[in-house]
Amino acid sequence: MSSETRYRFARTARLLKTDDFSSVFSLRASVGNDYFQLLGKPNSSSQARLGLVVGKKTDKRAVGRNYIKRTIRETFRLNATQLAGLDIVVRSRKAFTRQEGAAARAALLSLFKKIRSCRALSSHL
């Protein structure tokens, strides 16, 4: 396995279709903090999948929105094994810069732990 494929954010790890996003939004299993809101739903796969919602209200500049998305994807990729069997949509609430990146990643990690133990998800597993 080459190093390129090992670090890639695979297509199978993404929520791509509107129906996939809609099903996660309809379950309403949600946790949040100042930086993010996470919505989750169990999936039939053994792999976690991620969907992103980073709007212009969060950051008007595309450079800032792209940095937020890269940060979320990388944090998810490194922790995907903990989230196996879940579809997760991450909504950004607040823009952050590189100086605040570590705090945002820590906030996202704490939300990953919370969503995994969320009661609404436990009843559907």
Image (spheres, grey):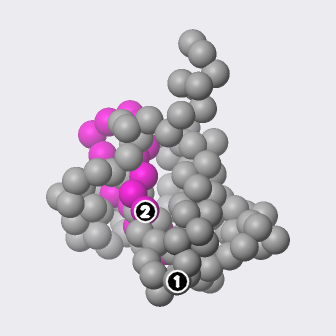
Q: Which residue, given by chain and number where applicable, does mark 2 sit on?
A: 52
Q: Which residue, given by chain and number where applicable, does mark 1 sit on?
A: 60
Three-letter residue code for mark 1: Lys
The residue furthest bottom is 57
Which residue: 30% across, 46% down?
A: 43
Three-letter residue code for mark 2: Leu
Q: Position of residue 6 (x, y in %)?
A: 58, 25
- Residue bounds of the magenta highlight: 36-52
Kind of element beneath mark 2: strand
Q: Establish if 107 lies above or below 93.
A: above
Prevalent SS, magenta region: strand
Q: Establish if 50 lies above or below 115.
A: above
Q: Position of residue 78 (x, y in %)?
A: 63, 42
Which residue: 46% across, 72% down?
A: 54
**Residue 32 sits inside the magenta stretch:** no
Q: Establish if 45 lies above or below 109.
A: above
Q: Earlier in the sequence, mark 1 or mark 2?
A: 2
